[in-house]
Image (cartoon, rainbow, N blue to C red):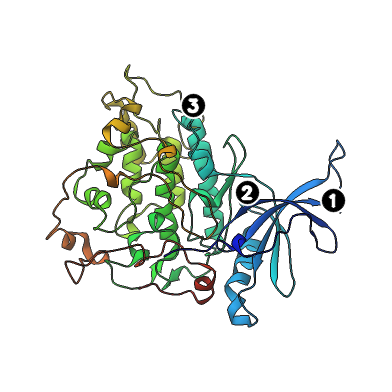
Amino acid sequence: METTCVADYLPDFTGKLLGNGQYELTRLLGAGAAGVVYLAHDHHAPTTSKGAPIECAVKIIPKAGPLNSQTWQQQQEITLHKLVSDVPHVLTLYATFEDTQFFYLVMDCHEHDLFQLLCRDEFPYADNDELVRSVYVQILDAIHACHDRNVFHRDLKPENILCNADGTEVYIADFGLATRQEFSYTFCCGTSSYMSPECLAQECERNAYSARHGDIWALGILLINIITGLNPWEMAVTTDEAFNEFLVDDNHFERVLPISKGAIRILKQIFSINPSARPTIPELRERILALPTFFPPKKDGSHAPVDSDLAAPKSGPVDSAAQEIVELEEDIGTVDLFSYGLDDGYPHSLTDSPSTSSSGSESQGLITPDDIPRPRVDISGFAEDLGEALRPFAAKDRKLSIEDASPALNVLERLDMLVLE
C-alpha cells in the first residue's frame, strides 16, 4: 500500500504566524502521512540569554472531515499525548489549538530522530555499552510510565523516537496510533517490522491482543536496532524466511546478529510467541542493567568497557535469569563484531538501504537478512508446538504481501481504525 505525504498537498506554512501571532513558523522539519512539523519561534516566551527567540516545534495535522466521528482519532492523539507529556523522555506537548482546517500541536523541538542516527556512516552506538544501556533504559522508563497511565503506543520505531545530535538523550513521540484500550481488535496497527505476531493476526486466531505486550515486542526490535543498526526480519510471520528460521533454529541470532549471547537470551524472552511469557518492562530493565555487554568479544577476547554502576541493577539482587546471562558471558567464544559485513551478505550499516523518516507512514526501515541466499526451513508440523498463539495458514500456498498487512495506517485509516484484511 502506498502512503501519501501530506506535504505534497498542504500549503507552505513557512513565515506564517499562528496562535494569535505567538508562533512564527520558520522552516519545515519533517512530514509524513499524518501531518507536517515546522520549527517555530515563540514570540511570547522570554528570549534566551543571548537575546534569541525561544524555538519550539509545531505539528500541523489536517482535519479529516467536518464530522466529529471523522476527527475522533486525531483528537485521540492529542488527548493521549497530553496524558503523558510530563513523563521524562516523552516529547513535551506545550499547547494545542485548532481552526476549521487544522489541529496545531506545539512541542519541544528536537531536529533529530533515532532513525537518522542509525543511518549514519559512523554508527553511534557501536561498541559503546554504556550509551546503548543508557538510551535503552530511557526508552524503557518512558514506555513503562505511559503504560502505568494506560497509554499504549503501538507504533514504536526509530522514526518515532526523537533525540539530540549525539544520540545520548531520546524522547518518545507520535501518539497517532496510541490507545487506552489494553486489549485491541485493531489488527495490523503500527509498522510491519515492529508488529508482534498477534497484532499482525495472519497466523493467529483473531482474538483481542494485548497492546502492552505488543509494545514489549517492539522494544525487542528496537534493542536490535540500537545495538546493530539492523532489523531481524521484515514481518513476524512464517512466510518471512528470517522469522521462520528464528522459530526453528535456536542459534539463528547467533549466526546472523553481531550481539552478545547475553543480549540474545534477553531477546529470545522478548520474542516469545505467547505474549504472557514476555518479560515485563521492569524485568527487562533489570536484565539490561545486569548485562555486562551487548556486543560479542573482539578478536583479543575483550569487551567494550562497561560502567560498573550500570553493570548491575540499581536496586535489589540480580535475578536468576540475569545471573545465568552473566555466567554465559564468561564462556562466550571469540567473535569479530564486524565479521558480519557485506561480503557475508549481511550488512551492518543502514547506508546500504536508504530510508526516509515519516510519522504514521511506512519507511523502508532497517536492513533485514532476507536477501541472504539460504534454504527455507520446513516447519510442517512445527506450528502445533507453538500452542494456540500461532497457527498455520488455512491455505498452504497463501502468500503474504505488504498489501495484506499495511505497516502503518494512513490518515483516513486512522479515523476508521480499519482492520486490514
Q: Are marks 3 and 1 in contact (CB under 8 Å)?
A: no
* Tag shown at residue 308: 3
Q: Secondary structure at mark 1?
A: loop
Q: Nearer the viewer, mark 3 or mark 1?
A: 1
Check disc 1 and give the amino acid type. Answer: Ala
Within 10 angstroms of label 3, few (less than 14), some, or many (20 or more) residues? few
Write the residue at 46% across / 53% down.
Answer: 363
Within 10 angstroms of label 1, few (less than 14), some, or many (20 or more) residues? few
**Of residues 67 and 91, which is closer to you in this image?**
67
Whether residue 414 is situated above or below residue 246 in the rendered picture: below
Q: In the rendered image, is residue 314 in sight?
A: no
Check disc 2 and give the amino acid type. Answer: Pro
Q: Residue furthest top?
A: 300
* Tag shown at residue 88: 2
* Tag shown at residue 45: 1
> Looking at the picture, how far across and down is residue 7, in whole percent?
61, 60
- In the picture, the quarter occupied by the C terminus is bottom left
